[in-house]
Image (cartoon, rainbow, N blue to C red):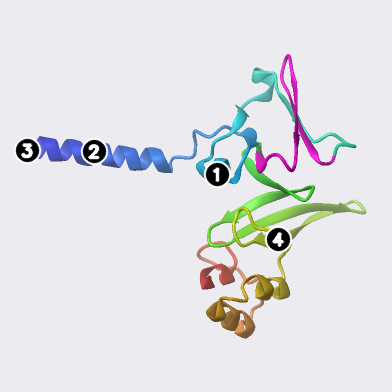
Amino acid sequence: MKQFLLSVLLLIGCNVFAQSDTSSIAKNGVYNTAADYQSKHLSFAYNNAREDGIKFKNPIGHYHQLWIKTKDSLYKFYDTDIWGYRQNGIDYRLYNGEMYEVNYVGNICIYYLPIVSSGSSGYFTCFSKDINSAVLELNKENLLEAYHSDPLFIEKLKQSKGGIYKMSKTKGRFLFIDWL
C-alpha cells in the first residue's frame, strides 16, 4: 500500500512539474488564437532559424503582415487573422496593426509598444483587461474608464500617492495590478 501511495504521489508531482515547465516551448512561432497563447501552442514553431531554414520577418511596406519563409514556401499572416507571435523567446500580441510585447498576463495584461524617434528608442506602456480586450495606453484615465465597474479598484486608484507606474519591489510589476 505504501508503494502504491508513493507511486501515485510521484506521478502527481511529475505531472504538475510537466504542466508548469515552459522551457519546452519553441523560441519562435505564431499564436493563431488567444487560446493558443494561453496554452503556449505555436504554429510554425522553430528554435534555430539557421538550422531549420526559416525566416521570420515583418516586411517594410507590409505593416499588417507577418511573413514566415521556409525553404520551399512563404506564409503570410495578416494581423487580423492571428493573435500574435513569439520571436526569440519574446511573445507579441498583434492589435490594430501594432505589435505589442507581452509583459504581464493575469487579471490585467500589460504590454510594451516599442517606439523609435530621432535616433532614440523607448516604449509606451499599454494594457488590456484580458488577452482579447482592446489595447489601451496605460494611464489613470484609461484605467478608470476600463474598470469603472470595480469600485474598490477605482477608490484605491484615486487615492494612490505613488501614481500608476509605481512598481512592487518584491513582485517586479506595477502595484495597482494587485488591487484588481
- Between marks 2 and 1 in the image, the one whose residue lies nearer the viewer: 1
Closer to the camera: disc 4 or disc 1?
Answer: 1
Marks 4 and 1 sit apart, C-alpha to C-alpha, by 21 Å
Task: Tell me residue 43's x, y (percent).
Answer: 61, 30
Q: Amino acid at mark 2?
A: Leu
Disc 4 crowd, CA 10 A, few/some/many (<14, 14-19, 20+): many
- Quarter where residue 16 is shown: top left
**Marks 4/2: CA–CA distance:** 42 Å
Farthest residue, direction right: 118
On screen, residue 152 versus residue 79, left or right, reads: left
- Amino acid residing under circle 4: Cys
Highlighted range, magenta: 63-85
Disc 4 vs disc 2: which is toward the camera?
4
Residue at image point 53% right, 80% down: 152
Q: Earlier in the sequence, mark 2 or mark 3?
A: 3
Look at label 3 and name its amino acid: Met
Cα separation, mark 2 vs mark 3, equals: 14 Å
Task: Read off the residue under disc 2.
Answer: 10
Q: Residue under circle 4?
A: 126
- Number of residues whose C-alpha sits closer than 10 Å to that of mark 1, classed few (under 14), some (14–19) or many (20 or more): few
Residue 35 numbered mark, or none: 1
According to the image, label 3 marks what residue? 1
Q: Which mark is residue 47?
A: none
- Mark 4 vs 2, N-terminal side: 2
Question: Does 21 appear in magenta?
Answer: no
How far, Cα to Cα, is label 4 from label 3?
A: 55 Å
Q: Is residue 40 left or right of residue 80?
A: left
Q: Residues within 10 Å of mark 3 (few under 14, many from 20)?
A: few
